[in-house]
Structure formats: C-alpha cells, structure tokens
C-alpha cells in the first residue's frame, strides 16, 4: 500500500532558515530536524510557571538565563 505524504510550504526569514540548516545533522531532512527539535527538553511546556510577577524586564532576564543554561535553572 502506497501512502502519499502531504506537504506544506512555510515562509521563514533567511536568518531562521540558515540557523535551521546549521542545526541539521548529516543526512537529516528538515522534517526529521523539526521532529527532533519539537521533542527536545526545553519545550514551552517545561517553562510553564517559570515566569514570576517581576514584569517583562525580569521575564526577559530569566529567559536569557534559561537559554544560556539550556533550561536547567537559575545561574
């Protein structure tokens, strides 16, 4: 039985495309890359409740800290 895979075109900024291209592993398709990235630790679900009541500036500092540490808590 032959199953036809559907596809969608998505417009993204060139800088984002270039960053995704750098993330791809040898022989990995973009579909495989997206699936891998969507299932990595550090998803939005894991960040739920991470923001306090310190306002937007504090949230931005906390987000930068999470990105530096890979989502592994305060530094």
Image (cartoon, grey):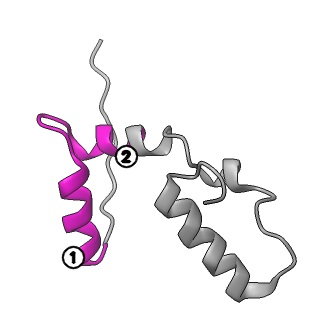
Residue 12 against residue 3 in the figure, above or below: below
Say left or right for 27 vs 57. left
Q: Kindly give the residue lying farthest to the left in the view shown.
A: 26
Q: Secondary structure at mark 2?
A: helix
Where residue 66 appears, x then y in whole percent?
A: 58, 61
**Quarter of the figure with the C terminus:** bottom right
Q: Nearer the viewer, residue 42 or 1?
A: 42
Q: Which residues are magenta?
A: 12-35
Which residue appears at 31% of the width and 35% of the height? 5
- Residue 50: which disc? none
Q: Secondary structure at mark 1?
A: helix
Where residue 33 appears, x then y in whole percent?
A: 31, 43
Q: Kindly give the residue lying farthest to the right in the view shown.
A: 53
Judge the density around disc 2: few (<14), some (14-19), many (≥20) Cα neighbours within 10 Å: some
Q: Which residue is mark 2?
A: 34
**Quarter of the figure with the N terminus:** top left
Where residue 6 appears, x then y in whole percent?
A: 34, 42
Number of numbered tags placed on the structure image: 2
Cβ atoms under marks 1 and 2 closer than 8 Å: no
Where residue 34 appears, x then y in whole percent?
A: 37, 46
Q: Which residue is mark 1?
A: 14
| Magenta part, dominant SS | helix
């Amino acid at each position: 039985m032959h199953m036809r895979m559907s596809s969608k075109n998505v417009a993204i900024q060139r800088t984002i495309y270039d960053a995704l291209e750098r993330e791809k592993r040898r022989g990995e398709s973009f579909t495989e890359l997206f699936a891998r990235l969507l299932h990595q630790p550090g998803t939005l679900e894991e960040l739920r409740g991470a923001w306090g009541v310190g306002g937007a500036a504090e949230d931005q500092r906390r987000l930068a800290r999470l990105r530096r540490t890979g989502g592994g808590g305060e530094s």
